[in-house]
Image (cartoon, rainbow, N blue to C red):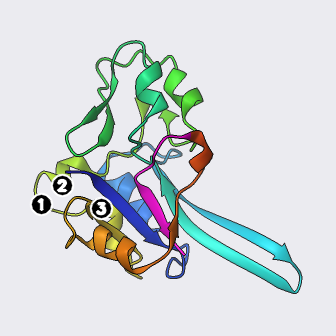
Amino acid sequence: MRYAMAIDTRKCVGCGDCVVACQVENNVPIGYCRDWVVESMAGTYPKLEIEIRSERCNHCDNAPCVRCCPTGASHIVEGGIVLVTHQKCIGCGACIQSCPYDARYSHPDGYVDKCTFCNHRIAEGKDPACVSVCPTKCMYFGDLDDPNSPVSKALQDRRYKTLAPEAGTHPQIYYLL
C-alpha cells in the first residue's frame, strides 16, 4: 500500500476550500496551515501561462525530514504516510530546514506539525478533508498499488509532474498537467 495524491492543475481554481477544511479538521491554530494554494506564472506577455495548485507535505519515500530527526518523532507509517509524533518532538526544527517543500511549521505548543493526509480519516475509509470538500473535484487520493484507485487512474490518464524532483525525495504528490 502506497498512499498518494494527484492534483489537477487545470481544474484547481485556488478557492482555498482545501486549506480551510484542513484547518478545521485538524484543529490547526489560526495563522498556521498544513496546506496552501500557490499561483505561478510562466512566459512573457502576451503568452503567459498560469498554474494554480494546492501544496502540502509530499509524503516522500526518501524523506529528509525523517532522516534528520534526532528523536525519531518524524517517521513513516504503513502506506508511506510521513507523520510527527508530537510527544517525541523537541521542536528543534531540523525537519523544517530539511524539507525542500517548506511543508512543516513550528506549532505554538512546541512541536513541529504538517499534513498527515488526514490519516485518522483514512483509517475510517474516508478521503482526506481537503479532497472531500474540493468543489472542482481536482484532487485524487488513494493507493498507488491499486490500479483502480482514483489516484492511480488519474496518473494513468494524464501527464504529470512532481515538485523539486532534483531533491531525490520521491514525493507522493503529483500535479496533473
Residue 89: x and y in percent read: 37, 19
Residue at image coords 42%, 40%? 114
Task: Report the Cα–Cα distance between label 1 and label 3.
Answer: 12 Å
Residue 10: x and y in percent read: 54, 81
The image quadrant of residue 136 is: bottom left
Residue where numbered disc 3 is placed? 129
Q: How many marks?
A: 3
Magenta stretch, residue numbers: 168-177
Residue at image coords 17%, 62%? 126
Residue 6: x and y in percent read: 40, 66
Task: Reply yes or no: does residue 173 show up in magenta.
Answer: yes
Residue where numbered disc 1 is placed? 125
Residue at image coords 23%, 48%? 119
Residue where numbered disc 2 is placed? 122
Residue closest to the eye, 3 or 130: 3
Answer yes or no: do the residues labelled 1 and 2 have beta carbons within 8 Å? yes
Secondary structure of the residue carrying numbered label 2:
helix
Residue 20: x and y in percent read: 42, 61
**Above or below, 32 relative to 126:** above
**Above or below, 60 relative to 138:** above
Secondary structure of the residue carrying numbered label 1:
loop
Task: Reply yes or no: does residue 77 show up in magenta.
Answer: no
Q: Is residue 92 visible?
A: yes
Q: Is residue 105 left or right of residue 129?
A: right
Q: Amino acid at mark 2?
A: Ile
Q: Main secondary structure of the magenta part?
A: loop
Residue at image coords 49%, 37%? 104
Task: Report the Cα–Cα distance between label 3 and label 2.
Answer: 10 Å
Task: Report the Cα–Cα distance between label 1 and label 2.
Answer: 5 Å
